[in-house]
Amino acid sequence: MRKIGVEHKSILMLLAGFLMLTSCEEVIDLDLQKAGPRIVIDGSISNQNENHVVRISKTIPFDAPNTFNGLKGAKVSLITPGGTSVSLSEISDGIYRSPQFRGTPGMTYKLEVIAEGRVYTASSTMPYPVLPDSISFKKLSFFGNTRIYPNVYYKDPAKVQNQYRYILKVNDKQQADIVFEDRFNDGNNVSDLIIYDSEDDLKPGDVLNIEMQTIDRNVFKYYYAIGQIKGENGPPVAPANPESNFSNGTLGIFNAFTKSSVTITLK
């Protein structure tokens, strides 16, 4: 009797398994459990003299339309380092806005939200501003496609742990929300390349707005985790809720930040 080698035997076993799977095909209905809705808070205060906005919503089932499920009737307050409480007014469902005032770098601010009988609080310390020196554009090729990306230059302050967030809009449409840290660039002249995924390449006449924020460490970790889930920092990781700086186990983030904004029209 002819012996079957290990390799040939393995192939036969794989084929047999494949035939068994294809001949016993059936539809499996997954019993997906719907978790109860949770509150999500997205609040911020900047060093600009402006209205600061807090968005409060509730999570929706996975099979529901992806819309903003604003939470009405919350009591929202920004508390300054001196203990002054600034009340925010509800301007639409789930959108709360403060009077115009500016935050102060180096100070710690607190956000308090009372919603559905519970109190949620978060604190964030506003870093000192770091301003961009200049902006250039760089061509990169991926899989045969060449794209143009903005490159932001600045001087990182020495012996200070700094974190940065960039929000890029092209023709008023947000294309990127990405964070960097100075772990390997402390005190150096730095350039951050803002890579984003878009079907359209930049072209003459496009209007770019780049907002550069300095953010505290907890805020950086929150947005970095979101970037990992989206695959911005390598292969996507298993989805998990980013660590919030709010109490009572709610989702979201409170961000006290400094910012500068640059608008460029490509020629």
Image (cartoon, grey):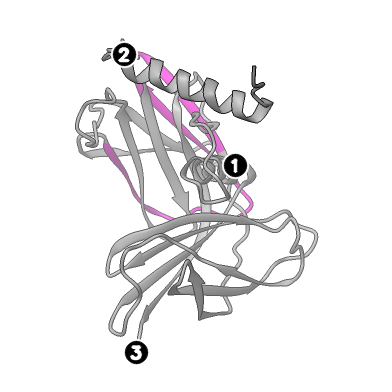
Q: Badge 3, how many Cα within 10 Å: few under 14, some, many 20+?
A: few
**Residue for point 51% across, 74% down:** 140
- Foreground of the two, 207 or 89: 207
As drawn, 267 above or below 91: below
Compared across the picture, whether 20 is left or right of 200 comes to right
- Whole-percent x, y for residue 257 in the image: 53, 53
Q: Which of the labelled discs sits on residue 221, or is there none? A: 1
As drawn, 229 above or below 163: above
Q: Give the mark nearer the N terminus: 2 vs 1.
A: 2
As drawn, 253 above or below 53: above
- Mark 2 or mark 1: which is in front? 2
Q: Badge 2, how many Cα within 10 Å: few under 14, some, many 20+?
A: few
- Foreground of the two, 230 or 146: 146
Label 1 residue SS? helix
Residue receiving disc 2: 30
- Mark 2 or mark 3: which is in front? 2
Residue receiving disc 3: 267
- Residue type (three-letter) at the residue carrying disc 2: Leu
Q: Is residue 103 magenta?
A: yes
- Foreground of the two, 172 or 33: 33
Whole-number angstrom distance, CA of label 2 to CA of label 1: 34 Å
Compared across the picture, whether 66 is left or right of 136 comes to left
Q: Which of the labelled discs sits on residue 5, or is there none? A: none
